[in-house]
Image: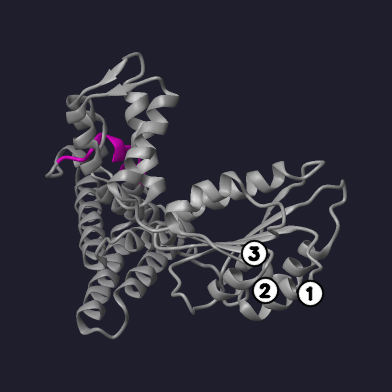
Amino acid sequence: MVAVKSQNADQFLRALPADIKAILIFGSDAGLVSERATDAAKRLIAKSTPPGEILRLDDTDLESDPDRLVIELTTIAMFGGRNVIRTTASRRVNTNMIGPLLESNTLEGALIIEAGNLKADEGLRPLFEKHIHAAAIPCYADSDRDLGSVIDGILKHHKLEISPDARRTLLTRLGADRALSRAEVEKLALYCNGKSRIEEADVEAATGDASELAIDMIVLAAGAGKIDAAISANDRAVSAGESPQTILIATQRHFQRLHRARATYEQNGSIDEALRALRPPLHFKSRDAFTAQVNAWSMQKLSKALEMIAKAQAQSRGGALEDNLVTDRLVLDLGRLARWKPEPRGHN
């Protein structure tokens, strides 16, 4: 029966009680939820002799085999030890499924469930907070103090120091999503490989605004047809406080630039010229991905994409759907459109 305080979460995981069989990790910071779920899984495996395996089950797995989660959790591991099952709260993984499992005291495997933000009396949270062999761990947006710990840990690993001015500037570049922040600091450390101290100029050169990075991940994934990655990036950006309207505007701008570049390419046959004509210029980090999308998207599909974006903006303004649902649906539809290929003529 453990309701862990957010500030004590990492300490709790480092000294994970031996009788904990199920952990709910939830909150608005999707990156931190994932990071702590990974940490918890590794620590649970390490406590098992011999070590078990980590198995990931998603809603799509349970759609084809609804009993699989229960079977995996109540079956003794083939090679001994205790397996860890990671899954995500969903319409199938809910209190109706998990409650009886916890009460039955038949768990052979350990369970880790990841979830979004939950109120104190909502969903799985009260179940895990009250059960004797379960724990609920919240994950909320990083404060400057938390981000400072992330910076210190990564730079210590790379044997790098950082000047006070560089540290202050870096903190302003990091967002509320732990995974994105960690990626930015890792990138900075790699950029400064061979140096002993990071200065402000290094931060300016190597890092971008974390919110801009998050939105770039959404539009580039949607344009590449990577539907799961686009939806995940969108959910993380919204959870981290990014405005859905900003996401809609950035998506429209991306596809307008694709439309402009594709039109220039079809006119003169040179992608390089089409990219050089873009204003503002294309950032070098996204050049390869953008070039691939100019090649992949026809003018017909790009026109359809812009129509879909305009419709989503109208839905957002009209309030017919929650803004985050509008952006979720849009990136899903754009991802499907990216994958769509017209049937050959004469096809029966």
Residue position for label 1: 104
Left or right: residue 337 compared with residue 46: left
Q: Which residues are magenta?
A: 281-292
Residue position for label 3: 134
Image: 47 above or below 246: above
Q: Nearer the viewer, mark 2 or mark 1?
A: 1
State the residue in front, 21 or 83: 21
Residue lying furthest left: 279
Kind of residue sitting beneath label 2:
Ile
Residue 70 image offset from top left, x and y in percent: 76, 69
Residue 218 image offset from top left, x and y in percent: 35, 55
Residue position for label 2: 98
Disc 1 + disc 3, Cβ < 8 Å: no
Quadrant in which residue 22 is drawn: bottom right
Q: Secondary structure at mark 3?
A: strand
Q: CA distance from mark 1 to mark 3?
A: 13 Å
- Residue 287 counted in the magenta span: yes
Left or right: residue 237 compared with residue 22: left
Left or right: residue 248 compared with residue 228: left
Kind of residue sitting beneath label 1:
Ser
Kind of residue sitting beneath label 3:
Ala
